[in-house]
Amino acid sequence: MNLIGIRITPEFWGDKWTDLDTFLDKLYKLIGYDKIIKMLVAEETINKMGDRTHFHYHIDMEINENVEISKRKESLQKFIRREGVSGNRCYCVQTFADVNDYDRWFRYCLKEKCIRNIGFSNEWITENTLLSQDERKQTILRNKKTQEQLINKNQFRDKMFKHIDGLFVSEPEEVDIFEAVGMYYTNNGKTPPFGKLKDITLDYKVHRGWLSFRDYYYLHHG
């Protein structure tokens, strides 16, 4: 099994980009159209957080050839660079000798709109587009929940440090800061993260200028 995944973001190609059909024609000549077993080309405009992102194409295919797939990746990268572009924001090429879930690998690109199809039935496209869209909805929900948890964690930490700022005018003993951190968690109905209290205490000392970044480093890497 030889699988190829290409992402193209035309916006960053500038005047080097003409149109999709021209790019695909060049791609077919490089690979050999008769070697393509299956192929999907899809458009995407939404990122993993559900926000609008740079318009880009996904070109996913399975090809039939004896060339080692890693060498095919090199030839594809050279082909794109010859178009006058470079860098991850312009394109990405991935190759796989095998995947755990063949159908899922292909349907990843079907989150929005499939515009080219070789080797797949209309029924397969319809069914897997719905599956892909549902998977993306679930992914966006998980990512937003994780982001919200991180924001809440950072806000809690900021409020805790501000509270402790008011407890100490001058540098106290480290154990006093340790206790203040633990009590703040307890007083706010949270179980103190005992395994991290020491690190949070040191973080606070850096925050107040009572511990230098250099000394902090040596405490962790001494």
Image (cartoon, rainbow, N blue to C red):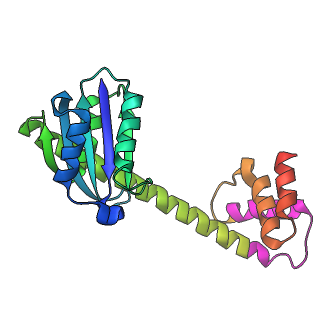
Please tell me whether residue 163 is drawn above or below residue 130 in the rendered image.
below
For the residue pair 179 and 200, the one nearer the viewer reads as 200
Find residue 129 and report its horizontal and vertical position in percent: 18, 45
Find residue 144 and report its horizontal and vertical position in percent: 41, 59
Find residue 111 and report its horizontal and vertical position in percent: 24, 50
Residue depicted at x 15% and y 29%: 34
Q: Is residue 53 visible?
A: no
SS assignment for the magenta stretch, majority: helix
Q: Which residues are magenta?
A: 163-186
Q: With 117 as the anchor, is 74 left or right in this view?
A: right
Please tell me whether residue 94 is drawn above or below residue 12 in the rendered image.
above
Q: With 111 as the anchor, is 50 left or right in this view?
A: right
For the residue pair 24 and 56, the one nearer the viewer reads as 24
For the residue pair 76 and 182, the one nearer the viewer reads as 76
For the residue pair 38 and 82, the one nearer the viewer reads as 82
Is 180 one of the magenta-colored residues?
Answer: yes
Please tell me whether residue 121 is drawn above or below residue 6 in the rendered image.
above
Find residue 163 and report its horizontal and vertical position in percent: 73, 75
The image quadrant that residue 75 belongs to is top left
